[in-house]
Amino acid sequence: MITRILLHSLLPALVLASGCRDGGSGDGGTTEDTGSDEVRQAQRGELQWKRNAALQRDLMRALELPEDGVCNELGRGSCTREIHHIALGAADPLRIGLYEPLPDTLVSTPIVLDRVVMSACVNRANLDQGGAPVVFTDLDFGAQAPAEGDDAFTATVTTLYRRLLSRDPEPHELTTLGGLAVDDAGKPVSAHDFAVLTCFAIGTSSEFLFF
Amino acid sequence: MQAPTVFIVRALSRHLGCLLAFAGVSLATTEAWARPTGPRAFCETYADAPECMGRSITCNKCHLSTQPVAWNAYGGALFAALKGAEFDANVASALRSIEDEDSDGDGLSNREEIALGTDPGDPLSQWMPRPTPEGAENPSFAIGEYDPAFAYKRVRLLFCGASPSYEQTKKFAEQGGGAQLEAIHDALAECLESDFWIDEALASLAHPKIRPVKALGPDTDVLISGYKITLADYQWDYRLWQYLLSGDRDARELLTAQYHINRDDAGNWKKVDGIISNPPMGFGGGQLLAPEHRAGMLTTQWNLLLNIMFAAVPRVAAGHAYREYLGLDLSLNQGIKPVAGEPLDIDAKGVDAAACAQCHSTLDPLSYAFAYYEGIDLKHLNRTGTYRLERPAERIPGWDEAQPEFVVLDTKVDSLVDLAREMSQSREFQRNLANVFFVYAIGHEPVPDELEEFDAVWTAMPADGYSANRLLHRLVDTDAFGIP
Amino acid sequence: MTTKIGRRQMLLAMAGAMGTTALGSALSRATEREGSTADKDRKLLFILCATGGASIVDSFLPVTRTEVDDDALADTLNVYDDAKIITPTGSNIRCPGYVEPVGLLGNLYELGYGLDPFLAKHHRWMTVLTQECTSVNHNVGQYRSVTGAGINRGRTLMEAMALRHGEDLIIPNCNMANDGYIQPGIDASLPAFAQAEIIASPLGFAAAMDGVKGVLGAPDRALVERARGVREELDDASMFGKTFAGSPRRQRFLGNRREVQPRLEAAKMMDRLTLLPAELLDPKYGVMSSPLLPTLASKFSNLLVDPWESQAALSVLLAYYGLSCVSTIGLRQEPTFGNEKLITTPIAFDFSHNDHRMAQYLMWGHVLKAVDALVDLLQQLDYLGDPALGKMWDRSLIYVATDFGRDKTRPAKAESWGTGHSLNNGTLIVSPLLKGNRVFGGIEPTTCETYGFDGSTGDSTPGLNCSEGHIYSAIAQALDIEFPERIDMSALLA
């Protein structure tokens, strides 16, 4: 109990001293997602990260891929189990005597995550293109990417959000992802590229990695 | 901010040369010592302090260094309060006498810092309370309170190895508060039976305890005359760990089990009693130890091989057990509980030198109990992991005359089996096991505002039958787990 | 926000972004720019971890029978026949010559590199320091050998090195070793950039330098960049991103993704660090071998099968391309096979428990072969490929770290015997930054125990013992790393 008393007694001074919150502008905000930064932030913010085994399993689950269908590094071994497992948060007792996984991500972690998710997304898109589609059921792989607002566009993005993030996309997220239906020149990309890029953008988001 | 006062024994200049082994130095006006009995005395005085709950403070509470002896501000204040009086008899009153002081000048009294779990001798040792959430209502997360959806996802990922699906998430959200909490525990119960938890996550938590080495284990590639150089099989260790920390079993048997665990063809656990022979064409890989001398993970063939090796007095094995199963790392000065008269330096290794004695006075009385167990005897490879009553006398001249006592956690015991049982009953064992799961589930060691609920979790272990599963069910209910 | 982006990284990023860097022109490109002040002053540290207990008595501080001056005593000590000890011309250091494989397991090994050719070639760079460590537990001994038993606020040498010389490098502290050698220090105030990047797979690490290259079927890089831009927008705007904007773990991840990843990709580090030869790279991946691979392979001929060599080779690339200033490599517990026999022992130097002399000779040879290759390469290569910066060697220090020493006794007259762990030992450092061709401290022939020296004068004195903190301080002083507790080791400096 003394702990709590002390915490309360210290609170005003330490909040001022810590300065670690971005803080809001003070105009109150709303309870809706307005896109502003004023929503209440996590009090603890001590996120866990999805380490190699869970990452692999989550991609297998979300994209309905077999274990060896997620990522193989240059044909030499599993990205998540053999080549990049340390950067993805695994221990390695037998090879390097790393008995406990590292607490935090490494410099190479975001890069490796890109590779793993990109590989998984490409593999799923290839499978769907070559056979009965499982994830990208609303895309015509022989055509261009659907334009933002098209039913196929919305259905594809919604499917990926549901599979990867277990939620529906917000309207502003649909709008933002519209940028992936076209290239830098504004020309529509292929449906295959759209599938991969959308999957990649969502699958490498911090929301997918952290929990 | 007040600068920390540093007391250093100037008589020992590092610049004059190299290491001089000592723990005490006579000065002109007083006598300066590092006191290995200090941590015990502190925790007897402040038994309810967070750092004394199932663990003990280290020398750093008072010392910047024990060699050469140097105190931080708090240690200096204690030193002054003792006024040269005999340490053990007067330390409690000296500690009390400086409670209201703020030795490190950080704004909190020594007593307040002790209650909080920060260091009263280090102004940089502070706990920053978490800021009060500000801003508009967060529509996705319950801020500043237990968030069931956040906790549910964590349970699924940490214990089932995959996020909840969209459908599962939706179904969860549609439930009321009470039902959601129930759903969290239902999910956890399901996950704790999963292959991911038992074969992947739980097994990975055993790595530091088992420390497998491929070159000596069942997967080695090296053959000698058709024999694999397997000296022991660490898979027995993993299975015992997995078995005892699943299925609501009694976790104390990690240190008391006198059986081993295998799997049948269907993958179900199978208890194996009695001696298990080494497999053919291998130097080890069985469990040759007579069951009455077994002490769970401490006496597997692998553990004895790896940690005893060739040692007459198995200090590494004892230190490993103390660290991994009680959470007390003597190399970091944790868990120092000196035994009077120790170390005997029974094998003439020089551990009675003052610099070594402060830890070896705790370590050696633990180690003696391991001396009956064989690590590696190159002339008798089939002895690895066996008990031989004559081993200590064969390996340690003077053993019979010395008649060393075996002591753990201030308790005299008769054998390693007794020692392990004593360990398994201790608060240190409970706290350490809970800490392993806390770090896995939360991602860090408990911090001051999490200690109260953490202590509540692990102190419930006896009531929960020492079940790891029940401990985990309590853990996912904590604020540390469920507040975003 | 504090960044660790130096001028060099900006140049690299710009060069890559502007498409001015042709594949395969890495060597010449590195010379196209001027080194920064930090580049000019930077030191390089290579820590070679001799896992298991490398005994100085069996390498560069041996004792001969004659010196014991008592035959019966000599029969029970780890001493060498006088004729076995070699002192190359010009060397003040000596070592054992060829050790015949004997004992039960003698025919398992394939002896490779000898100690005496190494000594003959490198004695002027070699500094031998005696020491007495403080633990005979492998893990603890390893850790203390790189933390100086906590002398510098609990920072490892690697962390201290990264702090001193690596603030503007992308991954200043790369650690490929094992067990206690890869444990982080305990200084909670250490900036993230100085923490070690742990590398378990040196041959696969290059792929961690680019998020797309070599991923079959990945869209065009411009499209991937577009997707990344969208992702960043989504991340910032999502309710998750807003809620956890202050999460340290997420911030660290995003910081690396937003600041470091583009630089690594722009600098095309994947092609530069790839240690696989062309024949092992399927062209469909579009990945090339490092331009330096032929040079490296000429020195590390076994790098594809021997992790020790692949680690050493990668350490050269990491330093050469300005990614890191300290690399740590370690002997694996798994033995390495040569043609048919073992070229390293199981559990590395710790096989001395079974067969001390053989294990020490074989493993010292294996360690020194890599040191030899490193010295040759560092003497050959200009730092950052820039002649104006001089040879890498001129700024380098190679520290052979080990867990502890080995027992000094043997069963009477035994030719093959096992040894336990001993606190008493010595350390080898190879560097132009220290006084070379020199032993600091000494050894007492009648015990084979080493004794220490005064770091400020260099005088050896029986009765003194130097600790891990002295070794740490000597290396720190040579590398311009300052800290209040540093012990004066001026006498060792070149």
Image (cartoon, coloured by chain):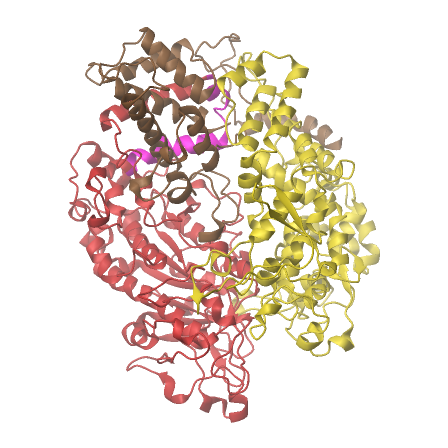
Chain colours: A brown, B yellow, C red
Q: Residue B348's spot in the image, x, y percent?
A: 66, 75
| Residue C432 shows in this picture | no
Q: Residue B106's spot in the image, x, y percent?
A: 65, 38
| Residue C157 shows in this picture | yes
| Nearest to the observer: residue B454 or residue B73 | B454
- For the record, the magenta segment spans C239-264
**Location of residue B64 by image quarter:** bottom right
Q: Residue A72's spot in the image, x, y percent?
A: 34, 38
Residue C416 covered by magenta stretch: no
The correct choice, above or below, for B439 with respect to C187 in the image is above
Left or right placement of residue A177 versus residue C345 in this view = left
Q: Main secondary structure of the magenta part?
A: helix
Outermost residue on the front side: it is B265
Left or right placement of residue A95 versus residue B293 in this view = left
Residue C245 covered by magenta stretch: yes
| Nearest to the observer: residue A128 or residue A204 | A128
Q: Residue at x 23, y 58 (%)?
A: C297
- On the rendered image, what quadrant is the N terminus of chain C found in? top left
The correct choice, above or below, for B76 with respect to A85 in the image is below
Count of number-bearing discs: 0
| Nearest to the observer: residue C263 or residue C441 | C263
